[in-house]
């Protein structure tokens, strides 16, 4: 049986299936809460649609729902950055609530941020996920970062930093040069597969099939397009080019062929060594570079299962070959990263914004987290303030619904890593506050009746948005918190879990604030402790209401066939 519960104390009021006439009495009882927001008729229609076949049986006094989370205040839209609500009944006004940033921030750790002090400061400034870039550093330096992050996590039940290991992948790079080589427009310049060559007009590449992969007429891009060369001819071991856009060629620069991917395996021997390092040190995510098809993901997941490793796989979409296989790649994965640097090198740059939007949409439809990465605040590597275009770039990613945005060189080796995180935090929070507000999730996401957990997540979001309350969910696997995140409720999802690994993984998901807590055998005792934690941490106040959800893959304190939604008032 499905049961909704609403309570003003710790004794829930239960809903049971009853005639429509009785259901409308519930709508009437709550209609005072909606004064100023909806006409009574619209309110009743919404409640009947959201809670069809449900009724309250009163075991206690009806709670006063006129001031959920304190008085609702309205702010007339005055600036072009404030979008009007998509709910026409709100007109030019929006509900203003205590904001918490929902879009997460991934920070790459490097020389600028590898100390204990800086990792603590990044966390307090807004970092949610630590990224280990295996293209740089060694296992010893990355192990130090992992240990520091775990030390931080051990100190808090309501704060957590996840760890993401980003594989190097099959990168094609130029060889070492004793000093930078200045390339000038129109000059001839060569790449050879012979090792150790470095002269004014020829350097080595680290890829033996480089000559076979390129064709006359191809455009070679250095460092994602900072320099470009046209292939004029090739021989057994040499590719002759003409410089189109010049610049300073330094050691080990990344090479791409416009519109092509190298015929290299997505996971190299070095990557497998790094993946084993991640298993040994219990990282939370792998970001796998240059994934071309779903087979790569299946191979890695099979390996992780054989190791008994609970690590999720994020696929980096950055190669031309991955685009025709997007659906199968994302389906096989646990999430995706829009790695715009190499993506914009292998494909025409004007395609990148469209692909970003498409990948985000696909991930949403499959309930997978998605990260937007590369060049988000590139200028802040050397400057204390961002360009206005960079600010807009962050805002666009937030508007499109990214779960997370990422900083690379800005925090790894930049001069202003903390300022970069602060800018990203501020822009994301401000953009979220301007997004359209609606009481119900988009209609196209209404679940089938057979998917009970998904259906309850949908209706819990509707109730929380209508009553302007945060959501509490208790989870052992994280599945219900992830499903709730998919429906993008207006307020925070407090996800209580008794599994540290689940707590760390959930921090990547949009709007989810994971909190570690041991569960009691008694449901009411656990509910009370959860509310006490929220009050003690200043996350909620006495007298506020919260929507509590019990559903999901593994039942906790309930018969498997029963699901609950409750509205509870926080008591002192």
Image: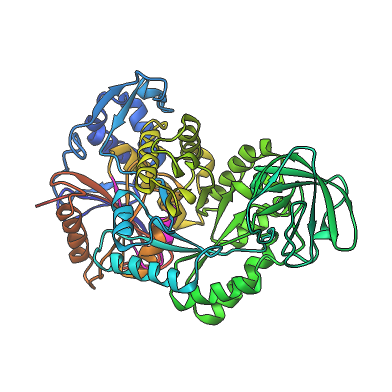
Q: Where is residue 96 in the image (x, y as percent from the top left)?
A: 28, 32
Q: Give percent across and percent down for residue 139.
A: 48, 73
Report whether 369 appears left or right of 557.
right
User: Is residue 285 or residue 193 the one in the foreground?
Assistant: 193
* Magenta span contains residue 516: no
Residue shown at the point (34%, 39%) measured from the top left: 465
Q: Residue at x 63, y 55 (%)?
A: 179
For residue 494, say whether it is visible.
no
Q: In this view, does 361 lie to the left or right of 237?
A: left
In the figure, residue 117 lies in which quadrant?
bottom left
Q: Is residue 352 above or below residue 522?
A: above
The x, y position of residue 305, in whole percent, is 55, 77
- The residue lying furthest to the left in this view is 572
Residue at horizontal 55 percent and vertical 53 percent from the top: 337
Is 163 in front, or is 516?
163
Direction top: furthest residue: 78
Q: Position of residue 182 (x, y in %)?
A: 68, 45
Whether residue 14 sits left or right of residue 300 in the image: it is: left
Scheme of image coloration = rainbow
| Residue 481 included in the magenta stretch of the image | yes
Q: In the image, is residue 186 above or below residue 311?
A: above
Q: Please give the range of residues in magenta.
A: 470-483
């Amino acid at each position: 049986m499905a049961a909704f519960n609403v309570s003003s104390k710790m004794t829930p009021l239960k809903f049971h299936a009853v005639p429509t006439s009785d259901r409308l009495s519930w709508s009437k009882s709550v209609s005072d809460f909606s004064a100023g927001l909806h006409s009574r008729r619209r309110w009743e229609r919404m409640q009947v649609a959201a809670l069809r076949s449900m009724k309250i049986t009163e075991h206690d006094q009806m709670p006063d729902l006129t001031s959920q989370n304190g008085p609702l205040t309205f702010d007339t839209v005055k600036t072009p950055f404030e979008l009007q609500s998509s709910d026409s009944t709100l007109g030019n006004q929006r509900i203003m609530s205590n904001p918490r940033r929902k879009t997460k921030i991934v920070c790459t750790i490097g020389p600028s941020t590898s100390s204990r002090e800086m990792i603590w400061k990044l966390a307090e400034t807004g970092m949610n996920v630590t990224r280990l870039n295996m293209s740089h550093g060694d296992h010893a330096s990355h192990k130090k970062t992992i240990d520091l992050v775990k030390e931080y996590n051990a100190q808090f039940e309501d704060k957590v930093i996840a760890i993401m290991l980003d594989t190097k992948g099959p990168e094609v790079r130029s060889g070492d040069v004793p000093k930078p080589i200045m390339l000038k427009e129109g000059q001839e310049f060569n790449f050879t597969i012979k090792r150790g060559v470095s002269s004014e007009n020829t350097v080595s590449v680290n890829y033996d099939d480089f000559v076979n992969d390129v064709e006359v007429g191809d455009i070679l891009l250095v460092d994602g397009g900072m320099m470009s060369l046209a292939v004029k001819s090739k021989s057994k071991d040499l590719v002759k080019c003409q410089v189109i856009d010049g610049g300073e060629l330094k050691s080990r620069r990344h090479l791409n062929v416009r519109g092509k991917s190298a015929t290299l395996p997505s996971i190299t021997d070095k990557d497998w060594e790094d993946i084993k390092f991640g298993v040994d040190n219990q990282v939370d995510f792998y970001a796998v570079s240059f994934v071309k098809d779903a087979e790569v993901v299946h191979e890695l997941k099979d390996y992780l299962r054989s190791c008994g490793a609970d690590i999720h796989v994020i696929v980096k979409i950055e190669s031309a070959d991955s685009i025709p296989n997007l659906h199968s790649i994302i389906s096989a994965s646990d999430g995706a990263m829009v790695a715009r640097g190499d993506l914009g090198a292998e494909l025409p740059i004007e395609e990148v914004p469209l692909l970003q939007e498409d990948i985000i949409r696909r991930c949403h439809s499959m309930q997978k987290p998605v990260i937007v990465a590369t060049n988000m605040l590139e200028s802040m590597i050397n400057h204390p303030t961002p360009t206005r275009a960079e600010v807009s770039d962050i805002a666009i990613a937030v508007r499109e619904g990214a779960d997370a945005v990422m900083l690379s060189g800005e925090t790894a080796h930049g001069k202003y890593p903390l300022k970069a995180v602060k800018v990203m935090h501020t822009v994301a929070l401000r953009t979220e506050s301007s997004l359209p507000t609606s009481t119900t999730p988009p209609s196209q996401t209404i679940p089938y009746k057979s998917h009970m957990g998904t259906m309850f997540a949908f209706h819990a979001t509707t109730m929380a948005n209508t009553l302007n309350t945060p959501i509490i969910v208790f989870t052992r696997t994280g599945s219900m918190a992830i499903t709730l995140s998919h429906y993008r409720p207006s307020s925070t999802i407090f996800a209580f879990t008794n599994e540290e690994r689940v707590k760390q993984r959930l921090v990547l998901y949009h709007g989810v604030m994971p909190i570690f807590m041991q569960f009691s055998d008694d449901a009411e005792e656990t509910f009370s402790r959860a509310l006490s934690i929220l009050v003690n941490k200043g996350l909620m106040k006495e007298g506020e209401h919260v929507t509590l959800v019990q559903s999901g893959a593994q039942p906790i304190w309930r018969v498997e066939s029963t699901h609950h939604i409750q509205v509870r008032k926080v008591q002192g």
